[in-house]
Amino acid sequence: MHEFYLIKKTETQDDDFFLYFYRNRDNYKDIIVDYITVDINVFEYIFDSLTWIPCMNPAFPGNPEQVGINEIGITLFDEHSASSLISIFTAWRDLFKNGPSVIRKLIYYHEYSNDDVLSFDRDDTIETFDKIIDISKQLSDGKYYLYHCGI
């Protein structure tokens, strides 16, 4: 599961805050504005396009800028990420509207079992993407971060 937290920017947020936010998130309920999860199968399905999003990496001192979400670990998005987040999730949402009610994708192209097939509910995914789009729009004004914690 991938978790996304929309959090208010404060003057006291430093490297340690972002590095340990996930572990101590219960102590920060006052700055958590919104929260959403993305199913791991959905994440795997769209992962390549998530590597295009500008972000920061709180796992390194100074939260260096990078491009691409951390699949396993933490990623921090701000106003510079908003337009990419919005356009990528809007594109996937609109594409999935044309798909079957259960989306499936083979992982392997040889003899396979049901364990080798990524599958997820289209309508639940569209709803999740709508919420991520709404959350991402809030990033544009520079008052929030979107904190991602993977697997």
Image (cartoon, rainbow, N blue to C red):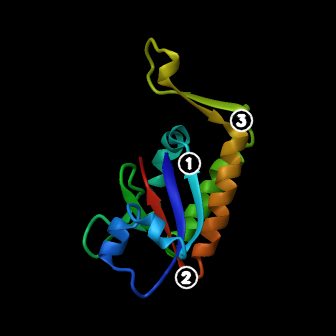
What label does residue 38 carry, if any? 1
Q: CA distance from mark 2 to mark 1?
A: 23 Å
Looking at the image, is mark 2 or mark 1 earlier in the sequence? 1
**Of residues 46 and 24, the one drawn nearer to the viewer in this rendering:** 24
Q: Is residue 33 left or right of residue 80?
A: right
Q: Is residue 35 above or below residue 101?
A: below
Q: Secondary structure at mark 1?
A: strand
* Place of residue 56 in the rendered image (x, y in percent of width and height, measured from the top left): 38, 68
* Place of residue 30 in the rendered image (x, y in percent of width and height, measured from the top left): 55, 76
What label does residue 143 carry, if any? 2
Dot 1 crowding, Cα within 10 Å, few <14, some 14–19, many 20+: some
Q: Is residue 79 above or below residue 21?
A: below
Q: Which residue is mark 3?
A: 99
- Foreground mark, 3 or 1? 1
- Residue farthest along the front direction in this orientation: 27
* Residue type at the position of mark 3: Gly
Q: Is residue 63 left or right of residue 50?
A: left
Q: Secondary structure at mark 2?
A: loop
Dot 3 crowding, Cα within 10 Å, few <14, some 14–19, many 20+: few
